[in-house]
Amino acid sequence: KRYSKDKEKKKKESIFDLSKYIDKPIRVKFQGGREASGVLKGFDPLLNLVLDGTIEYMRDPDDQLKLTEDTRQLGLVVCRGTSVVLICPQDGMEAIPNPFIQQQDG
Amino acid sequence: VSLSKTLNPLIYKLVDKCIGSRIHIVMKTDKEIVGTLLGFDDFVNMVLEDVTEFEITPEGRRITKLDQILLNGNNITMVCKYCACLVSLYSRYRLTGVS
């Protein structure tokens, strides 16, 4: 009897407001290992994104985990929210040497 | 006016504008699809025509399918209009003479 009251629809609240990234360059990582960056033009609560001037960073064909210098221009792109795993500002990240590699004793 | 319940209207409009044009769809895996967009639904499943499918293999592979396909939206990562980026796609797959 309380069941119906508890089941009142809750509006889907975002834990993060992407509007502060609008018109700013961001980096996006996808399920499957793809990475891209572009200027955020729009988004929705499901994390579908519209990016402009998009560049995709290609991975090494031999080692799928390694990024190469290779990029390609995709232009205006719709990114599916179902596949997005990470979003960060373009200048908010940098590559560092692998911290997990054990140093060999000389 | 968007009839979609799950897709944001602005994003719906952007994909809707592509209906009738050739578009380039990048999947989560190393597969890409180029085709003419006939339509899509709330989940961005797509109906495409005159489709070419590209897959990364050591040799590079291309499969051309005509007629229509229904592309499952589950694995779609990016959608863009057929453009200059495809020049690099063809060289990456070592293909020539693809329309």
Image: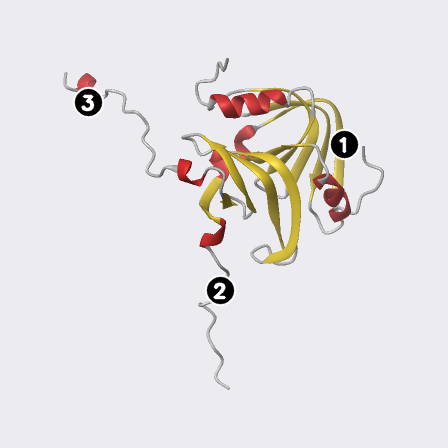
- Residue that sits furthest to the front in the current view: A23
Q: Secondary structure at mark 1?
A: strand
**Mark 2 — on which chain does it sit?**
A
**Mark 1 — on which chain does it sit?**
B
Q: Secondary structure at mark 2?
A: loop
- Asked if residue A102 is positioned above or below residue A86 in the image, the reply reads below
Location of mark 3 (residue):
A6
Structural crowding at the residue carrying mark 3, measured as other residues with C-alpha within 10 Å and reported as few (<14), some (14–19) or many (≥20): few
Q: Quadrant of the C terminus of chain B?
A: top right
Residue ID at (75%, 46%): B93
Amino acid at pointer 2? Ile
Q: Position of residue A12 (x, y in %)?
A: 33, 28
Q: Is residue B25 left or right of residue B66?
A: left
Q: Does residue B4 appear in this view?
A: yes
Q: Secondary structure at mark 3?
A: helix
Location of mark 2 (residue):
A96
Location of mark 1 (residue):
B64
Residue nearer the viewer, B72 or B12: B12
Query: Distance from label 2 to label 3 (Cα)?
Result: 48 Å
Q: How is the image coloured?
A: secondary structure
Residue ID at (45%, 44%): A87
Front of the two marks 2 and 1: 2
